[in-house]
Amino acid sequence: MSNDRLRDVYIVDAVRTPVGKYGGALSGARPDDLAAHVVRALVDRAPGLDPARVDDVVFGNANGAGEENRDVARMAVLLAGLPVTVPGTTVNRLCGSGLEALVQAARAVATGDASVVVAGGVESMSRAPWVVPKPERAFPAGAPEMASTTLGWRMVNPRMPKAWTVSLGEGAELVADRLGITREQQDAFALASHEKAARAWKDGAYDAEVVPYGDVDLPRDECVRDATSVTALAKLKPVFRPEGGTVTAGNSSPLNDGAAALLVTDEAGLRATGREPLARVRGSAVTGIEPQLFGLGPVDAVRRVLERAGRSFADLDVVELNEAFAAQALGCLAQWPELDPAKVNPRGGAIAIGHPLGASGARIAGAVAHQLAAAGSGVGLAALCIGVGQGQALVLER
């Protein structure tokens, strides 16, 4: 944090589950259990820390309509066996929810409102419920209208302009149109995401942060495809624009289940853990954009956070940019010509790893922290686009 009156904020540790595919290995796990799992694992990895010293648990979640209702952060505290005196709160900034949780935890520590906070995020898109709105009048004669809460707009306010409420995939198509991003470029980007993720898993790059879930047979992220190719990706049909579209299931992030958590402290909390920190929080930023262009949301957020942190693109050693769609990730990169693309998602991104909405921000922040720790020093950036037109970014240093 740049203000001298604020305390330094450290990320002591970061863990996550392997990311499960929709209807896959983690579909039998409730989201509150997934959250409890990473909270418990994080605390267990700091045996010198009395769990009663945790001042708060802040978790992001993008749904909130199903089994994660009633404040999933507090449910995680109780299910993880932490003292009942440890509170918990849940935040929702859609795809940025996990990063928002970390930002709020860092802010509490920086201002002295807390010394030790667990921040994270969770999502089970497999178990997202169907919802039925209450009828406008009693005793309706027709069948009720149901909406899936898995992803995207539902029960849209009729006052919203139609241009704002297009599907997320159509929003990615709009970005591709605006910036001239081709299908071939998107497929090549998606292939690279899978190749990098597969190589990272093979090399043990994720061993320090991934904590398997119970007795579920899921040794790595479930959506990583070792054997895919440009030829295979080219055979997939566009999903959102059947005629002339470029966005496919292959160059988009999948639907996923997973959870992630980070241990955030000040100096006193750090000493209590007996651990060396992975990284220090330098700054954060969040910005807005036209809702249909949500994919470009990170563009201004990244520039703003670098300015606040007193850093430039040249200072960055590692960047984790959430890959909601190849089109939007490429669109952001095109707006940052100063950034070396080789520094972006070196261990694969969400197209391969997956995008469990409320967990993704915590996952990529943890990934940056672990990479900085492995390198011994450096500056890292985590950034996401957010549905309904927002972007969020965080700078970490070691």
Image (tube, rainbow, N blue to C red):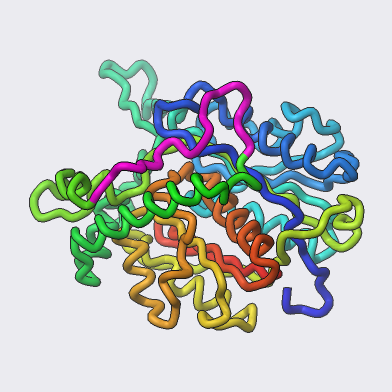
- Residue 268 appears left or right of 207: right
Residues 381 and 167: in front is 381
Residue at the extreme front of the image, as rendered = 203
Write the residue at 49% across / 45% down: 202
Measured from the top left, where is residue 312 in percent x and y?
A: 55, 83
The x and y percentages for residue 98 are 58, 50
Q: Nearer the viewer, residue 141 or 260?
A: 260
- Residue for point 28% across, 57% down: 172
Q: Does the stretch in magenta take in 215?
A: yes
Q: Main secondary structure of the magenta part?
A: loop
Residue occupying image coordinates x 50% and y 71% = 301
Q: Which of the 4 quarters of the picture holds residue 77?
A: top right
> Between residues 222 and 272, which one lies in front from this camera angle?
222
Read off the magenta span. 211-229
Q: Nearer the viewer, residue 342 or 393?
A: 342
Q: Is residue 38 magenta?
A: no
Residue 212 lies, in percent from the top left, at 61, 33
Residue 92 seen: no
Locate the C terminus and report the quarter of the image it occupies.
Answer: bottom right
Quadrant housing the N terminus? bottom right
Depicted 265 relative to depicted 213: above or below = below
> Is residue 135 visible to the viewer in this orientation of the structure?
yes
Q: Is residue 352 above or below residue 377?
A: above
Q: Is residue 218 left or right of residue 230?
A: right
Query: Which residue is pictured at 56% across the width and 67% down the height?
Result: 381
Coordinates of residue 325 in the picture (x, y in percent): 33, 54
* In this picture, residue 269 sits left or right of residue 92: right
Residue 257 to residue 48: above or below: above
